[in-house]
Image (tube, rainbow, N blue to C red):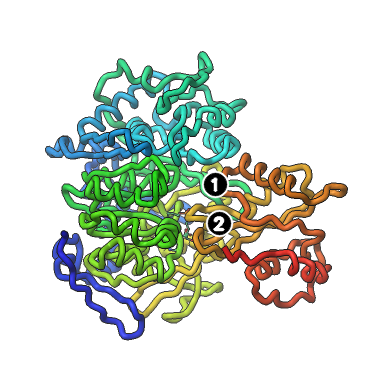
Amino acid sequence: MAELVNWVRKDPIEENVFWPSDDLKERSWVSDESIYEQAKADPEAFWAKHAEELHWFKKWDKAYEFSPHNYKWFGGGKINLSYNSLDRHIKEGRGDRIALIWEPEPINEPALKLTYSELHKRVCKFANALKELGVRKGDSIGIYLPMIPEAVIAMQACARIGAPHSVVFSAFSPESLRDRMIDAKAKVVITADGYYRRGKAIRLKQNADNGTAGTPVEKLIVVKRLQEDTPMTPGRDLWYHDVVADQPETCPAEEMDSEDLSFLLYTSGTTGKPKGIMHTTGGYAVQAHLTAKWNFDLHEGDVYWCTADVGWITGHTYINYGPLMNGVTTLVYEGSPDTPDYGRFWSIIEKHKVTQLYTAPTAIRMFVKQGDDWPNKHDLSSLRLLGTVGEPINVDAWLWYFNVIGGGRCPIIDTWWQTETGANMVNSLPGIGPFVPTVAGRSFPGILGHILDSGGSPVPAGEGGYLAIYSPFPPALTRGIYGDMERFAKQYFAEYGPERYFTSDGARMDEAGNIRITGRVDDVMNVAGHRLATAEVESALAQNDKVSEVAVVSRPHDLKGEVPVAFVLLRAGVEPSEDIRKELMATVNSVIGPTGRPDEIVFAHDVPKTRSGKIMRRVLKALVRNEPVGDLTTLQNPESVEHLKDQVGYGES
Ligand code: WT7
């Protein structure tokens, strides 16, 4: 058994405030609170100091440069993410450490372990294969892969040759893939024949075919994961194992400018059109490396497991680049947490002696519901630290995670950040604390987070407002929206001006600077940790020609945090029915994928509108939450609200 830590409860106001034990303080990279003041006094010097921990082909000229909507980190520096993830460790004698453990979903299949040297070889071979196919620095590459080792290998290979990757979540629909590949101008897409999920073989290639037909994609590279035959289009489709077969085992890493694009990742904004968030190389590398190291207390020999999918920013930064740049073992699990049963996560932790677990509140809530017997059957004593990400966590889930999974000895690091920020932004540090349910913590050293009112003035401690980040911006912060810099300026800097990044999150801060995130203040939902705009679900439903009008709002949900509820007006002559409901669900499935499916579809005769004809989503939102609908005097059709009251459920699930 790992040794127990004496948790000290200090704060008389909050009931559950935990502080690091002496052991934890000693072990962790930072335990002196003065780090915050030091970093705040000179953020540029702080980041520059930690940039030195990485390998640079050429050192930067200037740490930070700012002009409105155009800020730069480590300008003039030359660096490569893959070199820092792999070569640096091999050169410094860490080549025999395990870099990656892959746990397939079928329990009869053995896990795969790759050392840093082996992973390096595989990455180089694939990088050479991409080059042979004509891929050059700056060409964007689509990655539509499940949770298999090739997902990490492909990202690393792209980074190695300077071809920005654009990963699309494998559960996203062909249509989502198509939109993203067209926007990113990808000529090559890497996919797989399929993968195993909940005991079933899921075929992915067909989705890749549908999603790339009629796009500029010229080559589809297909990883063979299933035992079955897969139709291949001659001249376009290539097997991954064929293209890497005869490639040399080394491939020089491209010397990238700090500010060169390392990847695009599409995420939901408030409109129906996802935006391609641009991330650079140098600044991203520095913040990914340091936050992974400090926040998850990464040390030699650690087996670190982040359960996110590679299709999200969490997978990019905290499955791939962050842990690998730190030379620890990163665990990749192919499948579902409930296969073969709800003990799977805990059996994986026991089997591989996982030291850090980083997961989402949605998963924790699901496990709480399944009871303590599942984790209690397993030895979880290897765990030293727990992380959470993606959505606000509730007190019960936090305490369960802390006591039942962490055995009361592991700090919980609740990390607030976004696709746009590229890396963790707000969380307590393991050696400093405090660890408080529902409170993420302070802004990471060197990051200037403030809570403002809508006019841009800081609000007093304890009062609600909006979270904004001040310049000097964190090095990993996005530099733009691909192909739409106007939207970039408008989305993030219209609110408070170019020197203050607007996060779209509500928050409050205590006297000591600890931040509690209260959730999005725009029309972006967080469904089981997946980001989704209500407008995306609306435009998906509107594609069905039986729909004449539609409004989507979010409703809180016990397990998933939030779910979409759709109000649908059918075209004249179409009667509501179970078949139509199913058809509409199928429409959403095919346009977005299962994450977008409404929890409830309300067939409405009318929805509340202003006199100018705008749908009052505020009223619908109140209705589905069983809250007072407020002032209806500006409505053109107040009677619609009464009718809807009888129709909506309140999500008692
Ligand atoms: C939104 C960003 C960050 C990677 C995964 C999500 C919400 C994120 C937390 C947290 C409360 C959180 C915010 C944010 N969020 N982390 N620890 N506590 N809320 O990235 O898909 O870009 O979503 O997720 O609302 O704006 P994303």
> At 42% from the left edge and 54% from the top edge, which residue is drawn?
421
Is any atom of residue 390 visible in this view? no
Q: Which image quarter: residue 132?
A: top left
Image side of residue 354 versus residue 622, left or right:
left
Q: Which residue is mark 1?
A: 275
Q: Secondary structure at mark 1?
A: strand
Label 2 environment density (alpha carbons within 10 Å; few <14, some 14–19, many ≥20):
some
Q: Quadrant of ligand 1?
A: bottom left
Disc number at residue 178? none
Residue 459 x %, y %: 47, 78
Q: Going from the N terminus, do you reach mark 1 or mark 2 first? A: 1
Above-or-below relation of 46 to 208: below
Mark 2 is on which residue type? Gln
Instruction: Check if mark 1's residue and mark 2's residue have beta carbons within 8 Å.
Output: yes
Work out which residue is located at the far bottom of the displayed protein and give it: 12
Q: Residues within 10 Å of mark 1 (few under 14, many from 20)?
A: many
Q: Quadrant of the N terminus?
A: bottom left
Where residue 446 sits in the image (x, y, percent)? Answer: 31, 63
Dot 2 falls on a residue whose secondary structure is helix
Res 618 quadrant in image = bottom right
Residue 491, which numbered label?
2
Q: Is mark 1 within 8 Å of ligand 1?
A: no
Mark 1: amino acid = Lys
